[in-house]
Image (spheres, rainbow, N blue to C red):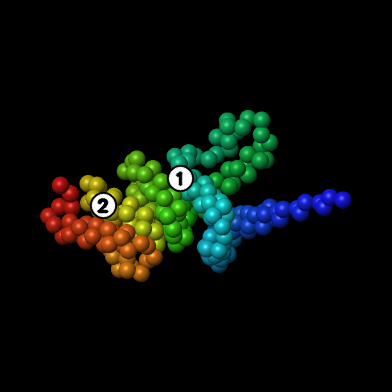
Amino acid sequence: MKKKPKEKKSDEKPMNDALREIEKNIFSLKFYPVAVDEDSKNEAIANLLKIYGKENETVKQLILFMLHESISQYFEFKIAHVFDYFRAKNPQEDPAKLRIEVYRKMFNYNTSLEGIMEIISLLGRIGGNDAAKLLTYHYARACVAETELHVSLRNAIISALGESDSPYALSSLLTYANHTDNERTFQRLMAAISKWNDKLDKVMMKDSTRKKLQKEVAEVIKKEFGTSHYG
């Protein structure tokens, strides 16, 4: 009599549990300040940091995906989210559901500049090259215009890259500093690079990478004290 093959242990339940926990905390973050208070919002951020720190790469990528989706709301900041806008997009939809869409856009934290800036700051606290790359993705898109919105987003991203522990974050800051012609942006970059200069010996990375970055930081700092930072 043949033995039944052993059933493979399913990873589906732990993954579903992790997904529910992530979604719960993302929702708490997004629903501030109307549906949750500041303590609940801060607890959600702490939980996301904890989950990201202990889970596998799949879960980490899922968190970054959801944060990216939340940040990307700034692409719609030119739009007035009124009932007629949603009705034009979905003419067959129940009017009650369309009104809910309006309320979400009105009250969700990530449909405001301050909300998106806090999520950007969270990416800096998460650290790692993946989160740093997501920050530089949004930095590139915030460079397409010189509106108050785009300047504020760029400044928030620069600050987050300065808080990161990712060597890629520092490398990106150095690249931006070496190529910008905007003096105000350069000063923002230098403030973030200075934070890195203070912690460069402590952040984990290859010795060869550390030496390379230390040299590049020294060169950029030298430019700051020259008559011009470019040319």
| Quarter of the view holding residue 117 | bottom left
Residue on which disc 1 sits: 74
Q: Position of residue 45 (x, y in %)?
A: 53, 62
Left or right: 16 in relation to 45: right
Rate crowding at label 2 as few (under 14), some (14 to 19) or many (20 or more) other CA atoms within 10 Å: many
Which amino acid type corresponds to the residue marked 1 in the rendered image?
Tyr
| Quarter of the view holding residue 35 | bottom right
Residue found at the far left of this picture = 227
Frontmost of labels 2 and 1 is: 2
Label 2 to label 1, Cα distance in Å?
25 Å
Q: Position of residue 92 (x, y in %)?
A: 66, 30
Q: Position of residue 135 (x, y in %)?
A: 41, 51
Measuring 35% from the left and 69% from the top, which residue is drawn there?
202
- Mark number displayed over residue 29: none
Residue 63 in view in this figure:
no
Left or right: 186 in relation to 142: left
Q: Secondary structure at mark 2?
A: helix
Q: Secondary structure at mark 1?
A: helix
Residue found at the far right of this picture = 1
Residue on which disc 2 sits: 177
Rate crowding at label 1 as few (under 14), some (14 to 19) or many (20 or more) other CA atoms within 10 Å: some
Measuring 24% from the left and 57% from the top, which residue is drawn there?
216
Which amino acid type corresponds to the residue marked 2 in the rendered image?
Ala
Left or right: 227 in relation to 34: left
Q: Position of residue 151 (x, y in %)?
A: 34, 49
| Quarter of the view holding residue 164 | bottom left
Left or right: 157 in relation to 47: left
Sequence-wise first label, 2 or 1: 1
Measuring 39% from the left and 65% from the top, which residue is drawn there?
204
Measuring 35% from the left and 50% from the top, which residue is drawn there?
154
Residue 79 in view in this figure:
yes
